[in-house]
Image: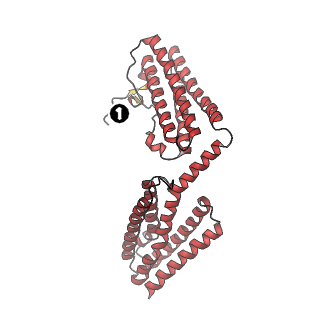
Amino acid sequence: MIPGIAARRRFKDLSEQEILALAISSEEDDARIYRSYAEALRDEFAASAAIFDGMAEEEDDHRRRLIDLHAERFGEVIPLIRREHVSGYYARRPVWLVENLGLERIREEAAQMERDAQRFYEAAAAQTSDANTRKLLGDLAAAEAGHSDKAAELTDEHLQGDAKSQEDNAAHRQFVLTWVQPGLAGLMDGSVSTLAPIFAVAFATQDTWTTFLVGLAASVGAGISMGFTEAASDDGQISGRGSPYKRGFASGIMTTVGGLGHALPYLITDFWTATTIAILVVFVELWAIAWIQNRYMDTPFLRATFQVVLGGALVFAAGALIGSG
């Protein structure tokens, strides 16, 4: 049996006091999560930070009401019981897994937090036969539904006019600067720069395994080089391009992926089959680059297509001619 799992209590085995204690600890945790979101957003998205401050205050108010109810019914000593102590209870993702993914992701996570809590209490109330416990769980479900209403009120209060649009535009711009631009540069470098060595070796040797090894080495080497170059080129403090580590990972991984795309077909032993598939993969890669440029960089599609496809075709032709010679 997995350690820790056996020690968990089932919700249906909890007493009314333990259910109330669980609700108190959950409200406390959620308030801390909202405050963490607010702190992470405060510098760049002040209006959204104010929303999460308000939601944290609502959680504090509900926690105080629950504590007052517990003191009235069971006394001052609240049992220590948390989410991880109860089998099947909804979990919260660590804050650091969410706050680095951008404004919209944080908003979605907050909405999901409220829905999770409300659904849990409603389902628990429906499965409870004791009248007092059913009432308690129903009250908690109503409280969670009220959180969603309060979130809507706070959104209307703090995100009036163009504030939400401005924050969304700023978040999109940050996403492009931190992830899309470095990733696109890596994909272009990996897809285009490895064409010449891979196809030169392919046509020179017509040995699929040797071609694959050269492609693998070129892709991984280019990925490492691009990743470190991107991370070291700008710390993001002045340019506002975001964490150098995020940009480095985006650039390095996409560079490697771009090169491996047309190297992997050479795992096929038949040379012409492998080469035909590799050429088709190159075609897909180049069109994908053009689409990303048009979608995120506002580059006209025809111009992006002309630049990428023409450049890729020239590099491919150079590699093929050199290898054939």
Decide if residue 185 is on the left or right side of residue 220. right
Question: What x and y, as percent, mark residue 286?
Answer: 55, 69
The answer to whether residue 119 shows anywhere in this view is no
Image quadrant holding the N terminus, namely top left
Question: What x and y, as percent, mark residue 291?
Answer: 59, 63
Which residue sits furthest front? 238
| Of residues 165 and 117, the one drawn nearer to the viewer in this rendering | 165
Residue 144 figure quarter: top right
Secondary structure of the residue carrying tag 1 is loop
Q: What residue do we see at 46% from left, 20% from top?
A: 20
The answer to whether residue 163 is above or below residue 266 is above
The answer to whether residue 236 shows anywhere in this view is yes
| Of residues 62 and 141, the one drawn nearer to the viewer in this rendering | 62
Which residue sits furthest right? 161
**Mark 1 lies on residue:** 5
Which residue sits furthest bottom? 325
Decide if residue 36 is on the left or right side of residue 156. left
Crowd band around label 1 with a 10 angstrom C-alpha radius: few (<14), some (14–19), many (20+): few
Question: What x and y, as percent, mark residue 230?
Answer: 44, 61
Q: What residue do we see at 44% from left, 23% from top?
A: 12
The answer to whether residue 179 is above or below residue 110 is below
Question: What x and y, as percent, mark residue 9?
Answer: 38, 26
Image quadrant holding the C terminus, namely bottom left
Q: Give amino acid for label 1.
A: Ile
| Of residues 55 and 20, the one drawn nearer to the viewer in this rendering | 55
Q: What residue do we see at 44% from left, 70% from top?
A: 265
